[in-house]
Image (spheres, grey):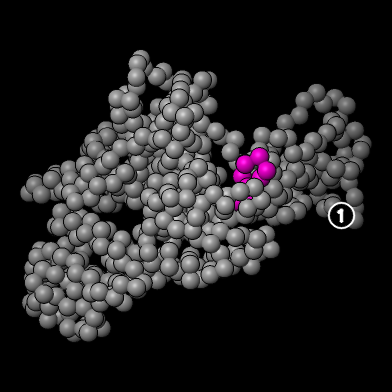
Amino acid sequence: MASKTMLVAAIDFGTTYSGWAFSFKHEYDTDPTKIGARQWYGGQLVSMKAPTTVLIKPDAKTFDSFGYEAETRYIELASDDNNEHKRWYYFRRFKMMLHGKMGLRRNIDIEDETKKSLPAKTVFSLVIRYLKEDMLKHSTDRMSSGHTREDEITWVLTVPAIWTYAAKQFMREAAVQAGIKNENLKIALEPETASIFCRLLPVEKMIEGGGMTSFKPGSVYMVLDAGGGTIDITVHEVLSDGKLKELHKASGGAWGGTQVDEAYRQFLISLVGNPVFRRFQVENKEDYLDMFREFEIKKRDIAPDNDNTVKIRLPSSLKDIFVDEFGEDLRTAIMQTKYANEVSLTGDKLRINAQVIKSLFSNAIQSTVSHVKELMKNKIVSRVSSILMVGGFSESKMLQHAIRSSFPNVKVIIPHEAGLVVLKGAVVFGHNPSSVSHRICKFTYGVKTTHMFDSEKHDIKKRIEPDCVPLCDDIFDKYVEIGQSVALHVATTEHSYTPTTESQSSVGFRIYASICLNPEIPNVRHR
């Protein structure tokens, strides 16, 4: 942490959208919820976060643009007849490549939209550097006097709680490569920061479900962080001192809002065919982008109790490609599909039956609800009295209804601007990093050591006899176990060791992590 924090800046690096926010120490002391952030503009869309899209120049190392600007710039390049855009690197929604990677390598490559590869850390660090510098430029306008020194800024970078330690370390190293000092950087877990911020909000800042009574000491609640890429779930208890105790390890899956986008994409492919859709995506990038931007707006209004037909503009370029490929108009072809009675094309408007549109949410919602139901079977989780829904996908009325109807005996709390509470909570966390006091261990931790040899328990191959004393080598000495609640910043246990030989003057320990509750022998599978 910065030696004397005057400014906390948070970066929320999301799957679909990213952004930054900040507050000065004097502002936090007066009103912790007074947090500055930037508005981003893209056509009809105005948002507090920008698309996680980056354009990198042909030299493979120079940043060009980010967000809406990167989308527009790439479209301009693609509209030229000289195919100049093929030399550039265009990445979008690439954060999910870190999800679930147990053996993540530092030098791993990722592919852009045209299958060209760059080192993942280069791409991530360029985006973080841009967001860092953009925040510094805008925060200068809020400074009453002077300039905030680099060592007075604490940076907070958010990551999903369900990510592996390797993925979290990857993000830290990318941030350091982006110019943020390691000692000034904190990695914050997204559900935790959301929880921290929502506890500060008055009742009127909640869409529904009330506020403060759900966060009083002794309360147990679930945080359901529904983002673009992942559903990230944790369970918290409010302690008597107001701090948070994690009661169940973070869990979830890749069931975020992008699952709905993919379902819509597959729906369109079922209408026009994959070759037509692929050609449309390659040859008409601006129309392709506009079509999905419009869907982004439309899907926010899709609700269980709304049975109105949804009208979405279908670009003429897509219809023209269909005619070119099949020699018939798309309107007639749709009448021959399984959607003949549910979808129609009138002019440039695709009219979609409400039930068809709602079905696009099914996979993401069913996976989420099933997972929460399974969690609720746990004795500890069954104490949950409230579900706090945060993240951009939590603004979906479809997901809200599914959670409310599936858990009628649990209060559902939804803050206004649910998609921003992770980012704003990260700022609050930066000012007060001790907000969380306990977490649940994801692994069993221990060291490799030796014990007195027991012929009934130990493998004879592991027997050693330094100084003629029979010992068993390769023993796992456990410190904490998977699922154990551990207090942060507090020593959990103390172990003492003696030299194996009289001549031994020093010792080195290898620390192992295992998914087993009681591993006996450390090996590469446990690391």
Query: Residue at 39% of width from left, 43% of height from top?
Result: 13
Residue at 45%, 25% in the rendered image = 26
Say which quarter of the image contains residue 355.
bottom left
Mark 1 neighbour density, 10 Å: few (under 14) some (14–19) many (20 or more): few
Residue position for label 1? 457
Q: Please tell me which residue is depicted at 67% across the width and 59% down the height of the picture.
A: 380
Along the horizontal axis of the image, is 379 left or right of 404?
right
Can residue 316 be seen in this snapshot?
yes
168 with respect to 395 (left or right)? right
The x, y position of residue 27, in whole percent, is 43, 28
Q: Nearer the viewer, residue 212 or 182?
A: 212
Give percent across and percent down for residue 237: 63, 50
Instruction: Please give the name of the residue rendered at 92% of the width and 38% of the height, measured from the top-left corner.
Output: 469
Disc 1 element: loop
Reply above or below: 296 against 130: below
Question: What amino acid type is highlighted by mark number 1?
Answer: Lys
Tally of marks? 1
Query: Where is residue 441 shown, x and y percent of the image?
Result: 65, 48
Front in this rendered view, residue 381 or 126:
381
Residue 129 visible in the picture: no
| Outermost top residue | 146
- Whether the magenta-drawn stretch holds residue 315 is answered as no
User: Which residue is most to the right?
Assistant: 468
Residue 239 covered by magenta stretch: yes
Q: Which residues are magenta?
A: 235-245
Which x, y percent locates residue 1? 53, 26
Instruction: Tell me: 478 left or right of 38.
Output: right
Relative to 244, residue 146 above or below = above
Give the answer, above or below, for where 164 lies relative to 266.
above
